[in-house]
């Protein structure tokens, strides 16, 4: 196999900096390339921007990019689905332990984990007034810090914070039952900080933009507005960001526990154990890390940390393979890798160009929704996960290859 090295693009002749791209076997849209060049014009970028093979157009900064910054953060680069990420665990079950007909198990999981959009004024993705005790206990570990946020930003109190904890959401969020190459059963899911994280993200994006206008800071894109270290607003954002990331991590833990409990109570499934430690990793977040001799803020927008020996999850689309990987700690990538396959079609385009028959064919063998409302999540809307993995062989090694047999979508 070839060992890809990054494509290096130098924008210094246009007032920018260096971009290193792991994209040798995948397409990169022109709009995404322009966004990458825009980010390099910011004066606080540390060394270069690293670009993952699932890169595609986003708000201000591309999804699939790793942005190291000194003494500043760009709220739109983190995005509004703060702490969105993956969770997965291997069970002692094997394929032959699963029921012959999987639809009843999918329905049981759908009943156990709230998901979907608001309907008739009621949020289906919420527990409403009947929040389970286990969710309430998890919330109490988050509540004190949230109350302090609300003191400064009272409107956050009106978000669906508690009732969204332990819920899936919509879009590309999912719960899957998968098989690895040894036919072992895995549970894998994808979600983030839900409505409260979205509110926090939008709040500070707007405040950063107001600060830029107030300071007459010239930006090539308003969505690259930033907050500077040493200001009260930066401190507030870092506190809120850290809280939302913890909310997202706990959210995934709760859903994973509920899915496993549902499987244990499901008729016909034998008793099983799980690995001691689930893999739980963010892919929309910021952290303080040391790179090239300096402590910097690393924003991974649609990328996961792939430090030496660290386990991570790279999912494909509905009907495609997913991968449990071990990081190689590549310094040029700021110890990162892709967070998935990455879109190659917008949601609107996918709904226009992908037929229901094509979706049904692409998801053959997977117990999942096969209707018009999920066409924007059909495999054809995403890049080839095989090409994505081929492009980042120097970032990760594959530990397990997974293929879903059940997929729950919001």
Image (cartoon, rainbow, N blue to C red):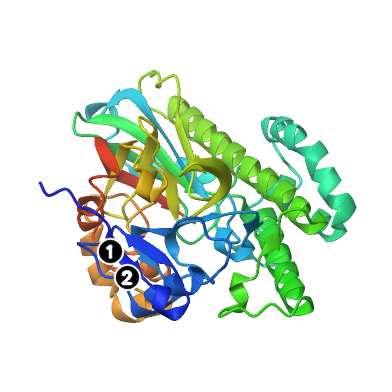
Outermost residue to the left: 1
Cβ atoms at labels 2 and 1 below 8 Å apart: yes
Residue 358 rendering spot, x and y as whole percentages: 23, 69
Q: Secondary structure at mark 1?
A: loop
The quadrant holding residue 252 is top right
Looking at the image, which is closer to me, 132 or 50? 50
Q: Is residue 401 left or right of residue 83?
A: left
The mark total stands at 2
Residue 344 numbered mark, or none: 2
Q: At x 45% / y 29%, what residue is drawn? A: 278
Q: Within 10 Å of the Cα at label 1, are there few (<14), some (14-19), or many (20+) other Cα atoms?
A: many
Above or below residue 98? Residue 4 is below
- Residue named by callout 1: 383
The quadrant holding residue 272 is top left
User: Counting residues from the N terminus, which is met first, the one under dot 2 or under dot 1?
Assistant: 2
Residue 292 rendering spot, x and y as whole percentages: 45, 44
Q: Secondary structure at mark 2?
A: loop
Q: At x 24% / y 64%, what residue is drawn? A: 26
């Amino acid at each position: 196999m070839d060992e890809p090295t990054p494509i290096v693009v130098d924008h210094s002749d246009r007032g920018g900096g260096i971009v290193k791209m792991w994209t040798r076997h995948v397409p990169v849209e022109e709009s995404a390339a322009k966004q990458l060049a825009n980010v390099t014009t910011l004066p606080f970028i540390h060394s270069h921007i690293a670009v993952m093979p699932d890169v595609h157009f986003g708000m201000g900064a591309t999804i699939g990019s790793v942005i190291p910054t000194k003494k500043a953060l760009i709220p739109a680069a983190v995005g509004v689905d703060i702490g969105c990420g993956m969770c997965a665990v291997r069970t002692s079950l094997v394929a032959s332990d699963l029921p012959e007909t999987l639809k009843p198990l999918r329905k049981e999981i759908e009943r156990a984990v709230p998901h979907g959009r608001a309907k008739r004024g009621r949020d289906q993705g919420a527990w409403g007034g009947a929040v389970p005790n286990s969710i309430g206990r998890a919330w109490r570990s988050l509540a004190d810090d949230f109350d302090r946020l609300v003191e400064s930003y009272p409107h956050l109190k009106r978000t669906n914070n508690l009732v969204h904890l332990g819920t899936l959401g919509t879009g590309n969020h999912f719960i899957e039952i998968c098989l690895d190459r040894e036919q072992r059963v895995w549970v894998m899911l994808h979600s983030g900080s839900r409505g409260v994280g979205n509110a926090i993200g939008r709040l500070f994006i707007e405040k950063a933009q107001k600060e830029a206008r107030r300071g007459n800071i010239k930006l090539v894109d308003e969505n690259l507005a930033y907050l500077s270290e040493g200001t009260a607003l930066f401190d507030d954002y870092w506190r809120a960001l850290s809280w939302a990331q913890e909310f997202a991590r706990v959210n995934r833990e709760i859903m994973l526990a509920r899915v496993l409990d549902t499987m244990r109570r499901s008729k016909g499934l034998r008793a099983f154990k799980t690995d001691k430690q689930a893999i739980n990793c963010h892919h929309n977040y910021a952290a303080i890390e040391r790179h090239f001799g300096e402590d910097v803020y690393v924003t991974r927008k649609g990328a996961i940390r792939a430090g030496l020996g660290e386990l991570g999850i790279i999912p494909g689309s509905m009907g495609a393979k997913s991968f449990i990987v071990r990081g190689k700690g590549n310094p040029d990538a700021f110890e990162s890798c892709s967070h998935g396959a990455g879109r190659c079609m917008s949601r609107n385009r996918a709904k226009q160009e992908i037929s229901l028959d094509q979706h049904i064919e692409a998801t053959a063998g997977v117990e999942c929704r096969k209707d018009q409302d999920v066409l924007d999540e059909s495999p054809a809307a995403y890049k080839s996960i095989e090409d994505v993995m081929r492009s980042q062989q120097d970032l990760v090694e594959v530990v397990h290859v997974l293929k879903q047999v059940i997929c729950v979508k919001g």
